[in-house]
Amino acid sequence: MSKNFSFDKPVYVLAPLAGFTDLPFRSVVKKFGADLTVSEMLSSNALAHGSKKTLHMLEKSPLEDPYSVQIAGADVDIVRLAVEVLNEQDGIDIIDLNCGCPVPKVVGHGSGSSLLLNLPLMGNIIKTIKDTSNKNLTSVKIRLGFEEKNHVDIAKMVEDSGADFIAVHGRTRAGKFKAAVDYDAIKEIKEAINIPVIANGDIDSYEKGRWVLEHTGADGVMIGRGAVGAPWLFHQLRSGEEHVSQELKHSIIMEHFDKMIEFYGEYGVAMFRKHTHTYSKGYQGASVLRNQVNSISDINEYRAVIDNFFKNNEMTL
């Protein structure tokens, strides 16, 4: 495992986001400042049954060192089988258990944030991962509770079950992604346990990232939606540079496009449209650009259009 990963100084982590944190995006974020990247959430059931699609999602960029794979599951035996499958895969340093996903489909299966309703089962699953895994570390991603907050009890149970560190999304399951993030609760967790704590939730700017670290006393921050359209956030936090040059933004956007094409081939063009939309927010001529790229499917033509746009336009916000 990378010698660069320790909690001696604040750790900057890219959160798993379905549909966004694929290999191309993770490799770009890693190149420009993230300490740790995490796979999109994988079903332990799909892993245990050898789903080819799920195994394909384990692929990582050579830059991703260290690399964490996040799994969801509610059945101890299935989780054990999933971990045994991961044990055969090289290049994974951390297995992370998702105990925070609020999506009804996941919760309906008893996994994700559903586990917050059954702490003994959650503890049993964490112990099973820890005992079965041949990877360096085991981590857990939680929310503050399901309907009500019982964050300190949850965090203590995570620690007692053998997890090496914890990431805390500062909302309950009931809060989904809209309720105000309770950074005081993350601070309370940090003060109550001895393993490293990573703060997560609504970190969407350099200033907010610095404030959250200071306010919570956390050992790092995990950024998800805030990094979509602004992956240079990690560079800012790592370097302490409040402002990012247009040149750096341009080079990151082009690197992201090239990685998408490298990974997905021609299909990467269509997939990059949503990223073009988020990258161009706040730019003069953004709506014209969006309309233009929606009808381009040729790789070289698309690349030339966005290259020209982001090289020659400044943000107006």
Image (cartoon, grey):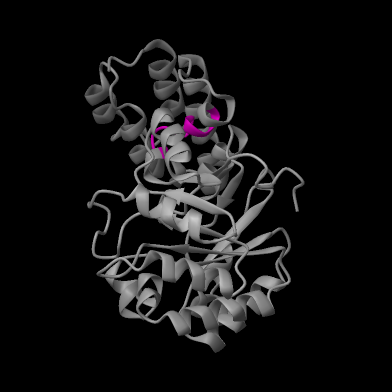
As drawn, 135 above or below 49? above
> How far across and down, in percent of the image, does residue 270 sit?
38, 43
Query: Exactly how many numbered labels are in the figure?
Result: 0
Q: Tell me what residue is drawn at x 42 percent, y 16 percent.
A: 308
Residue 50 visible: no
> How far across and down, in percent of the image, does residue 92 sit?
68, 60
As drawn, 63 above or below 120? above
Query: 191 or 130, which is in the foreground?
Result: 191
Image quadrant where residue 99 sits: bottom left
**Residue 252 in magenta?**
no
Farthest-out residue, front:
191
> How far across and down, in percent of the image, does residue 190 sit?
49, 54
Q: Report whether 296 appears left or right of 141.
A: left
As drawn, 42 above or below 220? below
Q: Which residues are magenta?
A: 227-235
Q: Report whether 102 appears left or right of 99.
A: left
Quadrant showing the C terminus:
top left
Query: 315 or 215, which is in the foreground?
Result: 215
**Residue 234 in magenta?**
yes
> How far across and down, in percent of the image, does residue 118 sit?
39, 82
As drawn, 240 above or below 36? above
Q: Tell me what residue is drawn at x 26 percent, y 16 percent.
A: 284
Q: Report whether 66 appears left or right of 10.
A: right
Residue 58 visible: yes
